[in-house]
Amino acid sequence: MGQLNQVLMNILSQAIDVLLNESLRQKFYPESTNTAKKPRIEITTKVISLEPTQPDAPDSRWVSVCITDNGPGMSQELQQEIMESFSVEKWADKETSLAMSYRIIAARHGGKLNFRSQLGVGTEFEILLPLV
């Protein structure tokens, strides 16, 4: 469980850093933003069923933990860099907290780490862990 705590803290710390940086940018460069948003991080959990990946396999149940922020979001280039850092070939090149989190979730717990981001809207990381 200690490693999962580390994953949650990595993602949460990243969201906090992004929101702090955005708040400072709004404070010192108010002309660079249309509206001042109140920084927000939301954490939600639920149990979901996913379609089986193989024929004749039973539906699988997963715990979903979503960490969402209303920060500036990520560019397509940054999202691509993050996805590449998740690949096995890139693990040795550049160790990031997100790449390490991905390895802990996928390799050690059989889970998945997904993310969605939209510029000007925010970012959501979803951790999926199989219920055994």
Image (cartoon, rainbow, N blue to C red):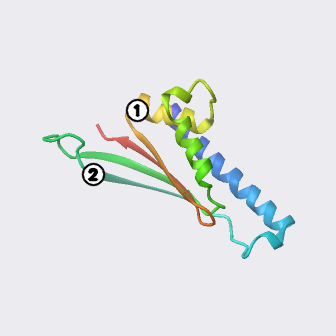
Side of 45 where 53 appears, left or right: left
Identify the residue at horizontal 37%, vertical 47% (top origin): 63
Tell me the quarter of the image containing the C terminus. Answer: top left
Label total for image: 2
Quarter assignment of residue 92: top right
Q: Is residue 131 positioned above or below 31 on the image?
A: above
Quarter assignment of residue 7: top right
State the image coordinates of residue 128 (x, y, percent, origin top left).
40, 45
State the image coordinates of residue 99 (x, y, percent, origin top left).
56, 35
Side of 81 where 45 appears, left or right: left
Mark nearer the N terminus (2 vs 1)? 2
Q: How far separated are the C-alphas under marks 2 and 1?
A: 17 Å
Q: Nearer the viewer, residue 71 or 39?
A: 71
Amino acid on which the number 1 mark rests in the picture: His
Residue 1 in view in this figure:
no
Amino acid on which the number 2 mark rests in the picture: Ser
Side of 53 where 105 appears, left or right: right
State the image coordinates of residue 83 (x, y, percent, origin top left).
52, 42
Identify the residue at horizontal 40%, vertical 50% (top origin): 64
Q: Is residue 49 positioned above or below 8 on the image?
A: below
Q: Which residue is mark 1?
A: 109
Disc 1 packing (10 Å; few <14; some 14–19; many ≥20): some
State the image coordinates of residue 57 (x, y, percent, origin top left).
17, 40
Identify the residue at horizontal 21%, vertical 46% (top origin): 59
Q: Nearer the viewer, residue 29 or 43?
A: 29
Residue 110 in view in this figure:
yes
Q: Which mark is on residue 59?
A: none
Quarter assignment of residue 25: bottom right
Disc 2 packing (10 Å; few <14; some 14–19; many ≥20): few
Q: Which residue is mark 2?
A: 49
Residues at badges 2 and 1 in contact (C-beta under 8 Å)? Answer: no
Q: Is residue 86 positioned above or below 17 on the image?
A: above
